[in-house]
Image (cartoon, rainbow, N blue to C red):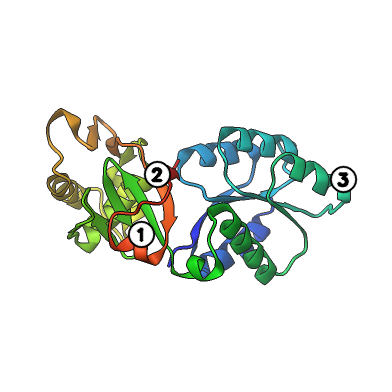
Amino acid sequence: MQQGTILLVDDDVDFRSLVSTYLRRESFVVTEASTAGMARHEFGAGPVDLVLLDLGLPDADGFDLLRDLRSQRSVPVIMLTGKDTPMDRILGLELGADDYIGKPFELGELRARIRSVFRRDKGLTESEMATASEVLAFAGWTLDLTHRRLLDQSGQEVKLTGGEYDLLRVLAEHARRPLSRDQLLDLTRSRDWTPFDRSIDVLIGRLRKKLSDGGDGDLIKTVRNVGYTLSAEVKRRRVAADGAKGMPQAEAKPAS
């Protein structure tokens, strides 16, 4: 089960590779950034549930970036640094960081701290965290990421093929961001493809029909000379296992 999306901000490429590989094995989605500029871009480009932030960045002070990210929206932040001093900890926590871990650290400790921050942020117990479903909600639809299914406004499941689900998930996770066919192919499948592969267009047509999506109010819009985009606002949330059986009622937050 996917545990959440993490933005890892650190200029050490070997460190990023080690941490991101480990977290992906633990079912987290990881986006990487080596500079404050890249971090700001990634933070605004897609869903982020938690930020792992190294304070020693080459192009900006980590505390300034922390202040900037927290001013945009309330996302948990765990600070990472090789200079573990009480003053740094105090300043970071005063700026809104949720936790602080000094380098070097055990990867298992990092995982435990991430899960602890998630539990506090989402108000879940340990058992609820293990069984909760993660969903993306938009325009009355609910895409259940845990069980790979789409629920309509009344909580009834709308059957999707594997390809349709993968494509809808990518569109929802990049809502209001136009994606080219090449990008969609890269993000939805692992096999090789050719520039003449038109399967994305076929899947888009199927999704539009299943979403009862027609006329000027298309949820999935065609962006001329670019590709496609999901035009609705998307909110990401976690709901207890019982809530996932029908349309979730838990409070939602924007996905991006």
Residue at which label 1 appears: 145
Q: Which residue is mark 2?
A: 235
Q: Which mark is residue 87?
A: 3
Name the amino acid, label 1: Leu
N-terminal of the pair, mark 1 or mark 3, is: 3
* Residue at the (26%, 43%) spot, across then down: 140
Residue 100 x/y as whole percent: 74, 54
Which secondary structure lies at badge 1? Answer: loop
Give the residue at x 29% y 38%.
229
Query: In the image, 227: left or right of 243?
Result: left
Q: Residues within 10 Å of mark 1 (few under 14, many from 20)?
A: some
Q: Can residue 183 be seen at all in this image of the molecule?
A: no
Disc with the residue nearer the chain's start (3 vs 2): 3
Q: Is residue 57 above or below residue 31?
A: above
Q: Is residue 55 above or below residue 69?
A: below
Secondary structure beneath label 2: strand
The quadrant in which residue 118 appears is bottom right
x then y, percent, for residue 59: 70, 36
